[in-house]
Image: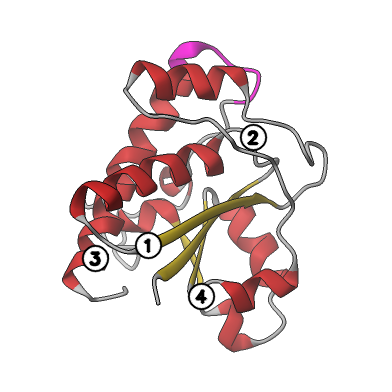
Amino acid sequence: MPLRICFVCLGNICRSPMAAVVLRSMAADEGLDVDVDSAGTGSWHLGSGMNPSAQAVLARRGYDSNGHVARQFRPADFAMHDLVVGLDRHNVADLNRLAPSPEEAAKVRLLREFDPALPAADRPDAGAGDRDVPDPYGGSDHEFDEALDLIIAACRGLLSDLTAGSGR
């Protein structure tokens, strides 16, 4: 059975679907059997496609982003995923509140925890805000590029953990 991962942001039209596209592509390149999904904590964009700026930045980098439909993360989703990855600390807090049990809450992680360029979370120089992927919604192409750079770096770290079998 493949490892099941869900990326979660606020509206599920920018960051979390971008992360899903990136990790899905990286895992396929490595021949890793991973089921990658995404969702949002909010309901504003239910049924919408990916934000056009998010699609454009992915396309410029060679990723295929077709077929995304925004959905909302529900408590029942915990049972369907082995790892639930928030894109910022507010998403993680929302997910922890939604978790039906401590075991389900233990599945929640912050994406940039996997970025090997960042200090370990328990080090004094590890700033909490530095671990967020900023929401580029309504922002410039540059802001979408920056968000994608952070997502790619963290997904590389996550993929490294997955291929090493650590499940971190």
What is the secondary structure assignment of the residue under circle 3?
helix
Q: Which residue is mark 3?
A: 161
Q: For the residues labelled 3 and 2, say whether their Cβ atoms are less than 8 Å apart.
A: no
- Give percent across and percent down for residue 1: 40, 77
Magenta segment includes 138 = yes
What span is colored magenta in the figure? 137-142
Q: Which is closer to the viewer, label 1 or label 2? A: 1
Q: Residue at x 26, y 61 (%)?
A: 32
Q: Which residue is mark 2?
A: 13
User: If you read the primary sequence from the N terminus, does the residue marked by circle 3 or circle 2 appear first?
Assistant: 2
Q: Distance of mark 1 from mark 2, alpha carbons?
A: 21 Å
Q: Distance of mark 3 from mark 4, alpha carbons?
A: 15 Å
- Give percent across and percent down for residue 84: 53, 65
Along the viewing direction, whichever of 4 and 41 lies nearer the viewer: 4
Say whether residue 72 is visible. Answer: yes
Along the viewing direction, whichever of 162 and 145 lies nearer the viewer: 162
Magenta segment includes 24 = no
